[in-house]
Each structure stands twice: as C-alpha cells, then as structure tokens.
Amino acid sequence: MGNADLRDLAAIESISFADFRGSVVAIDAHNWLYRYLTTTVRWTRDDVYTTATGEEVPNLVGTVGGLAKLFENDLVPVFVFDGGVTELKAAEVERRREQREEAERKEAEAREAGDAIEAARMASRTQRLTATILETTRELLALLDVPVVEAPAEGEAQAAHMARSGSVEYAGSEDYDTLLFGAPLTLRGLTSSGDPERMDLEATLATHDLTWEDLVDVGILCGTDFNEGVAGIGPKTAVKLVHEHDDLWGVLEAEDIYVENADLVRELFLNPDVADVDLDTGADVEPDVDAAREYVTGEWEIPDGEVERALERIAESTSQTGLDRWT
C-alpha cells in the first residue's frame, strides 16, 4: 500500500479540518475503501452488511459515514478509481493475495476456537474490492452527488496528477507514494477519528536538498509497490547515496546494486499513465439523501440504524453551508 519508509523523510504536519475548508480533494478511492472495509468488518457484526443472498457490502456503511465527515467539514471529494493494474505491480498483488489467504486460515481457526475477537480481527484482513463493492460505491457516490474519475491506470497517480495540474487542491490517500507521483499536497487521515495530516512535497524536497527525480530514486532504493527495495538501504541511507552519486544510475553502478525494472519503475512515477480531467464547475453539491437511504437500506438491506445518523449529517451539512463544489 505504498512506501511507508517515506514517512521518515516526508514533511508532514498535523492540521485541523478548518485549515482546508472548502478545498477539493482527489481521493484515491481504492485506498479509501480498503480502510473502511477493514474497520467496518472488524467492528461491525457481519449480518449488518450481508444481504439475504449472502452479498457483503461493508463499503456502504463505511462510505456513508466517511462522506458525512467530509461534508460536515465543507470538503468537496472527487473519488478516483483505479483503471488497469500495471504488470510491475504483479508481485505486490500476489503478496496481498497470500496475506489474505493466511488471514482466512487464522480466521477459521479463531472461529473454531470460539475466539470472536480474533476472528473479527482476521476477517478485517481478508477484505478485497469485489466487483459488487466497487459498483455499489460508484452508485452511492452518484446519488450523493460526489464526482467520480476513472483513472487510466493507478488511481493514486491520477489523484496526484489532478493536484499537480491544479484541478484540485489536494490528493487524498493514506499511502506515501503520492509524493513519488508528484502530488504537491496530500491529505492523510481523512478516514481516522483524529486530526488529518498534510504532506508537502516541496517542503520534503527542500528539507533533504532533493529534486522530485531524486526522491523517486530514493523511493526505488527503499522499495515501492512496483519493486523490491535494496536490502540494508533505508530512507536516510538512500538520500545519502543519491547525494553522493547524483542519481539512481550512479548509485547502482557505484554500489554494484541491481534493481529489477528500475528504469520502468522510475518512468512510471515520473510519467505515469494519467488523464487531464475537465471537472464540472460552479454547481452546488446536491446529494439526494432520500435516494441514498433507499439504495443502502432498501436495495442493499443495511439496517437503518447503521447509516441514518450519517445520512442526516450529510443532509444537514449541505443544506446549512450551501456547499459549493468549487468554492
């Protein structure tokens, strides 16, 4: 889910929602959904989000609650969904599949042992974005008048591009790879209960006397979703090596290091497959809360009590603030 080593280098500050009220945020939809799937499944009975036919839609519970928080704080989300997955990510996809299978095994063992808490914890780690989850999320967002962008490839790259091109003020992701994709500002913690964080690319580069290209080289040495890092090289060592040897190629030659597909990974971050987006401007946000309620509780059988307060918060916040999509 991104290079966590980058946190040791990133310029990150804790801020309040009041600091960026009215901002438009391009949210990495898959990242957002994974966060809410794991928390909803861990802390909610499975009968709450399972239909009579056995389909599981915990995303609807989490997304309604998460959107209420954004609307209440006068934020305008644009959800960016992944397109095709690059072959470079095959190893990461396989690693996640193996982790889910191991979690499923441990969940079964915990249920057999009567350990409901451990079973719920393991169940939260088995979640994946099914076609139903993705489809129902898109349909719910449409009912709540939340724009959706379909990325050509990586949603995180598209969100970063939208922030870099000025289509939105921020990218929104829990990952750190938005730095490598060139997002000037990234909001983290939008799904958490505490204050969010703002991650600043230019401040990060200035702190470590790096260019964006240098930072990508540092990320590749440490490891990304698209390549294995070099054993023994952490973020501080990577910065030191890039300073000493000018760039990734200088480091690889001087240290006699091999990084598979290094040139392709570097190109993926610096010139990703993204699209310019012409967002509709000027219109107020007008969520159809009644239609969303019927969709979630009627069509998908989520108990009213699980989403009613969040839907009321959405209705109240948009009617009181007259939330403008592009203030």
Image (cartoon, helix red, strand yellow):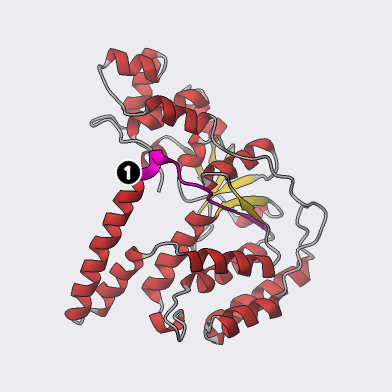
Crowding near the residue tagged with mark 1, few <14, some 14–19, many ≥20 C-alpha atoms within 10 Å: some
Locate residue 48 relative to residue 151 in the image: left or right: left
The span picked out in magenta is: 75-91
Relative depth, front residue between 310 and 221? 221
Q: Position of residue 326 (x, y in %)?
A: 77, 52
Report helix, strand or loop for mark 1. Answer: helix
Q: Amino acid at mark 1?
A: Ala
Task: Residue at 45%, 28% (x, y): give it.
Answer: 266
Q: Position of residue 173 (x, y in %)?
A: 51, 50
Residue 130 is one of the magenta-drawn residues? no
Task: Residue at 78%, 59% (x, y): give it.
Answer: 324
Q: Position of residue 298 (x, y in %)?
A: 59, 85
Locate residue 212 relative to residue 282 in the image: left or right: left
Q: Give the image quarter of residue 122.
A: bottom left
Relative depth, front residue between 14 and 292? 292
Task: Residue at 33%, 65% (x, y): give it.
Answer: 126
Is residue 213 positioned above or below 48 on the image?
above
Q: Give the image quarter of residue 5.
A: top left
